[in-house]
Structures are given as C-alpha cells and as structure tokens.
Image (spheres, grey):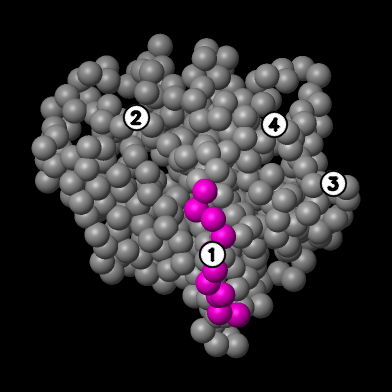
Amino acid sequence: MTDLPPQDDVPGPDAAVRLTSLAHGGGCGCKIAPALLETLLGAAGASSFTPSPDLLVDASTRDDAAVYRLSDDVAVVATTDFFTPIVDDPYDFGRIAATNALSDIYAMGATPIFCLAILGMPTDKLSPATIGEIVRGGRDVAEAAGAPIAGGHSIDTAEPIYGLAAIGRVHPKRIRTNAGARVGDVLILGKPLGVGILSAAFKRGLLFEKHYFEMLSWTTLLNRPGIALAGMDEVHAMTDVTGFGLLGHAAEMARAAKVRIEIEFGAVPRIKSSWGYMMEGAITGASARNWASIEDFASIAVEDHADEARTLLTDPQTSGGLLVACAPSVADEVVSLFHADGHVFASVIGRVAAGAPGVAVI
C-alpha cells in the first residue's frame, strides 16, 4: 500500500544503501529510555562541584538546554542534539536533525546565534556525496534560523549520526524553563503528534508518499514562536516534545514545577494519517519504553481506545512541537502566534492543576 519507490530500489548515490537500514533506530526514537537515563545519571553520583550562581539552568530539572548568565542583560543558552536517520534522503535527514537541535534553543525562549556540527558516518558504506548532502541539509536549516554552522567534529562510526550543538542568547529575565508552570495555567501544544508512527510506517514500506511529505513538513518546521512567547510575561513555562513523547515531557514539566498536569485527549492535535498507520501496527519500540518509564506517574482515563491513546501520547516525536504553559488570558494570543508562523494545528490541550505531581489524561 505504498506509492513510494520500493525501498530496496530507492535511488541515490549509494545504490541500494538506505540510510535507515544502517541504524537500529531513527530520529528521537533512538534516545535512551527515560528510566534507564535516570539510572545512568544516578549511577554517576552527585557532583561535589559547586556551580557558579551565573549557571541559571542545569540538568537538575531535565530541561532542554543549559543557561549561563554573562551579564545583567545577556545569557548564553547551549544544547546538543543528534541522532540516527529517520528518513533515507540525506538532505532531508540533515534538515530534520538540525531543526530538532535548534528546537531546544527556542524552547528556552532564546534566539539561536551559531551552531557546531556533530557528524559520525560509516565512510565505508556512504559516499562523500551522500554525507555532503546531510551536511548541506543541516547547514541550510541553521542558516535559515540565523545560526550558521561555525565548525564541528566528525568521526567514522558504524551507524550514521548527525546533529548540532546549538548556541543561543536570551535576556536572563526572558528565560522560559520547564519548571515555571503555575496552577491555573492552560497547556498549548504547537505541533500535532504522530511523527514516530509515520516513521515506523516508512521503515516498514507502508507510508504513502503524500504522508511522507506531511511528516517532512512538520519535522522541518522551526519552533521560532518560542522567541516571541518568551517576551510575554503570562507565558510561564515551555519545553519541546521530542523522544519521550507528550506524556514523558509533560511529566518532566510536572516534576520540575511540582504540579499536576491534566491533558484532554480529545483536544490533542494529531497527524490525521497517523491513526490509521497505528491501527496497522506501525508503532515504535520507544513508545512502550516511554510508557514504562512514567506509568507510575501518569494515568489515562479514556473510555474508548485507551491503548491507542497511550501509544499516541508516548509516541516519540522527532522535532516535535513546543508545549507551553500560560495564563488563560493569553491563550488565544499564544495560539494565534503559533498559527501565524505555520503551526496551524496548535491548540489548547489541557491545564495545570493543584495536587500531587503527576500527569492525568482525561
């Protein structure tokens, strides 16, 4: 049921070599599972180093980036993100990876200023032309964001890996973290869910061409609204929804802010075609891992399609949307800002409530 070329015959400079065939996972779905990550961080032990008071945001709340204050008016935001291929076209892979990496800068309310490339390639399997297209895709996105790639590092690896270390700047008073959500806030999601499902369908040869380009349109859409949102006092918290799925990143927000997050499943935007592929079994392994990591912290009270709801809400999003907590009085303005920037499915999906920290789907 596909009108893409047969995947054993995908044209390209490396004949039958598909980028996705060289990797065990793809996109943000290849992230280490949240529960294992917590174990690894715990095994590393607490640091005895006393950080500078100018280190405004570190890893303690599992936020999107680190923030260091340079002066009363300027703070630098730094992040890194890279992964294995989610698509076979090298230029598209580079674009998706770069868009995803820059998202962490926007999620903190910052403006990206420059990037460094992170490149690991199996040079015995991929031609210089193919690798060059990956780099070109990343460069084009970074330059469109006003953050040129100023350098980087490359190694020869068994699996193809590409991403960016992205640097941004922000006024210290305009930083938005995942810890600022307040009781009474509403939650707004900037992009629809379902990217992981479509990527799983692609790897299985099920994805229609029109749905491939739909997936591509969302994964290469920059989260630029984060800059303007940080200038609104009524916007209290932001994070981006990526490899841990909506529930996983909502859980991080709930823990960091010590609040209860309630999500209305019927209000959550989704890529329309993803539901059908999900019903055909196009599900990533990361979805189950994501749920296992938060099942003691989250509850789903959806009478119909409870299993499907859990799958969609834990679906790993590569280059997903911003999750915003803001005062109800500016909800319409926030949604309109998203819509004006091409995030046409942005909508209110829930609220922040008092009570023990957790996530409830209703």
Evaluate if marks 4 and 3 touch, with contact meaning CB atoms under 8 Å apart. Answer: no
Q: Which residue is mark 3?
A: 356
Percent coordinates x, y for residue 341 in the rendering: 56, 55
Graded by Cα atoms within 10 Å as few (under 14), some (14 to 19) or many (20 or more), the crowding at tag 4 reads few
Q: Is residue 165 visible?
A: yes
| 215 horizontally vs 244: left or right | left
Secondary element at image label 2? loop
In percent of the image, x 39 and y 34: which residue is there? Answer: 26
Residue at disc 4, secondary structure: loop
Point out the image quarter for the C terminus: top right
Three-letter code, disc 1: Ser
Provide the residue span drawn in magenta.
Answer: 43-53
Toward the viewer: 23 or 126?
23
Query: Label 3 is placed on what type of residue?
Result: Ala
What amino acid is labelled 4 in the image? Glu
Q: Is residue 309 magenta?
A: no
Q: Amino acid at mark 2?
A: His
The residue that mark 4 highlights is 295
> For the N terminus, which image quadrant?
top left
Say which label, 1 or 4, has the lower sequence index. 1
Residue 24: mark: 2
Which of the two labelled residues, at mark 2 and mark 1, occupies the earlier sequence position?
2
Q: Which mark is residue 47?
A: 1
User: In the rendering, at what x and y percent does residue 31 appear?
Assistant: 46, 40
Circle 2 or circle 4, nearest the eye: 4
* Residue 271 rendering spot, x and y as whole percentages: 57, 32
